[in-house]
Image (tube, grey):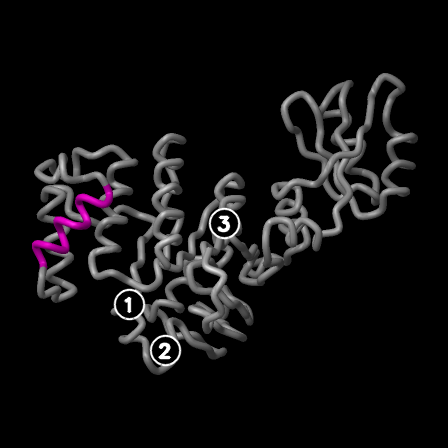
């Protein structure tokens, strides 16, 4: 990520949106810097897509203010749309057209003057030139993902918004996709990406976690982990289901989650947790302190959030 000081690409505060009297995004404030890969995480239905759509001018916030690419999100939505590449969750291109035909259509929609050159460059950059005559409907998930990204880059956007782009894609394709994203960021493109994968979250420069429309944490991975104040132990031995049930009955234990042949048990009071272990665990079971991981933190944050549809 570039370390030069420039105005934030995204700078918003108090962003709020409701549907049918249910608040789905509640007073979110956020800054995203130039050249940054910013991860946006949260469970399904947490408001991530709604927030992205407000950033790029597809939805108008009910309340709040701010800028995206230096343009007011309330009054200059059209200017923002022209400068943003938005990749939706679902593949939204024509399956009965070839890759080149799909990209040419998108280029026409943007009104690009050098349409053929733009399509050629996008096909080449994403490694699609050899498949340009293939029908989009014949592509695997990983290649469809590449086509969607190529279409987003045609008009040389200044900001890329990617909504769960790697869902359903195999690990190899996911890794290649992330290498491309880091290459784009190194060239100065700012990327905001939603994901459910912890390994992807750890590849972001900074990230935010949203649950039920509320921003629960943001910062670097280490800042988010440190800010949670979690104490985590690994419990080995004994029956996992029985041990987990016993530990969850203690007020000292915030969560007990199976990881392989052991349990990750977290809380906020080390002394109280160790007292619970001495009382509830059998002599053959061991409990070893370990660093809290991002997944431990996100499960904890999810438990703290209040369901806005309840």
Write down the residue under mark 2.
Answer: 71
Q: Magenta stretch?
A: 115-126
Write down the residue under mark 1.
Answer: 83
Q: What residue is shown at x 50% (from left), y 45% (from top)? A: 203
Distance in Å between CA atoms under marks 1 and 2: 10 Å
User: Is 299 placed above or below 104 here?
Assistant: above
- Determine the image quadrant of residue 152: bottom left
Side of 268 relative to 142 (left or right) = right
Answer whether residue 118 is magenta in the image.
yes
Label 3 element class: loop
Dot 2 alpha-carbon crowd within 10 angstroms: few under 14, some 14 to 19, many 20 or more: some
Distance in Å between CA atoms under marks 2 and 3: 25 Å
Label 2 element class: strand
Answer whether residue 130 is magenta in the image.
no
Dot 1 alpha-carbon crowd within 10 angstroms: few under 14, some 14 to 19, many 20 or more: some
Which callout, 2 or 3, points at the residue further toward the start of the chain?
2
Image coords of residue 269 (percent x, y): 85, 47
In contact (CB < 8 Å): disc 2 and disc 3: no
Side of 209 relative to 300 (left or right) = left
Q: What residue is shown at x 34% (from left), y 34% (from top)? A: 173
Q: Which mark is residue 204?
A: 3
Side of 167 relative to 242 (left or right) = left
Q: Main secondary structure of the magenta part?
A: helix
Distance in Å between CA atoms under marks 1 and 3: 22 Å
Which callout, 1 or 3, points at the residue further toward the start of the chain?
1
Total marks in image: 3
Image coords of residue 118 (percent x, y): 14, 55
Image coords of residue 10 (percent x, y): 44, 69
Choose between 159 and 46: the one closer to the eye.
159
Label 1 element class: helix
Q: What residue is shown at x 92% (from left), y 31% (from top)? A: 279
């Amino acid at each position: 990520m570039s370390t030069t000081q420039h105005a934030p690409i995204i700078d918003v505060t108090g962003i709020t949106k409701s549907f049918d009297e249910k608040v789905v995004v509640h007073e979110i404030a956020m800054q995203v810097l130039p050249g940054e890969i910013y991860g946006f995480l949260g469970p399904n239905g947490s408001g991530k897509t709604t927030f992205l759509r407000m950033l790029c001018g597809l939805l108008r916030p009910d309340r709040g203010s701010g800028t995206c690419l230096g343009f007011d999100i309330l009054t200059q939505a059209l200017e923002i749309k022209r400068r943003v590449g938005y990749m939706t969750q679902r593949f939204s291109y024509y399956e009965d057209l070839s890759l080149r035909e799909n990209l040419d259509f998108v280029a026409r929609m943007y009104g690009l003057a050098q349409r053929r050159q733009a399509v050629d460059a996008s096909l080449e950059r994403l490694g699609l030139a050899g498949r340009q005559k293939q029908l989009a409907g014949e592509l695997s998930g990983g290649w469809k993902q590449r086509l969607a990204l190529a279409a987003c880059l045609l008009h040389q956007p200044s900001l890329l918004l990617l909504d769960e782009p790697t869902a359903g894609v195999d690990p190899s394709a996911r890794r290649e996709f992330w290498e491309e994203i880091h290459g784009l960021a190194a060239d100065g493109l700012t990327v905001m990406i939603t994901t459910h994968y912890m390994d992807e979250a750890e590849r972001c420069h900074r990230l935010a976690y949203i649950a039920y429309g509320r921003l629960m944490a943001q910062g670097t991975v280490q800042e988010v982990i440190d800010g949670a104040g979690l104490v985590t132990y690994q419990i080995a031995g004994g029956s996992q289901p029985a041990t987990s049930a016993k530990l969850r009955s203690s007020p000292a234990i915030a969560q007990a989650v199976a990881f392989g042949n052991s349990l990750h048990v977290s809380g906020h009071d080390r002394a109280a947790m160790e007292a619970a272990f001495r009382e509830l665990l059998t002599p053959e079971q061991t409990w070893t302190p370990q660093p809290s991981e991002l997944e431990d933190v996100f499960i904890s944050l999810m438990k703290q959030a209040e369901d806005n549809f309840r």
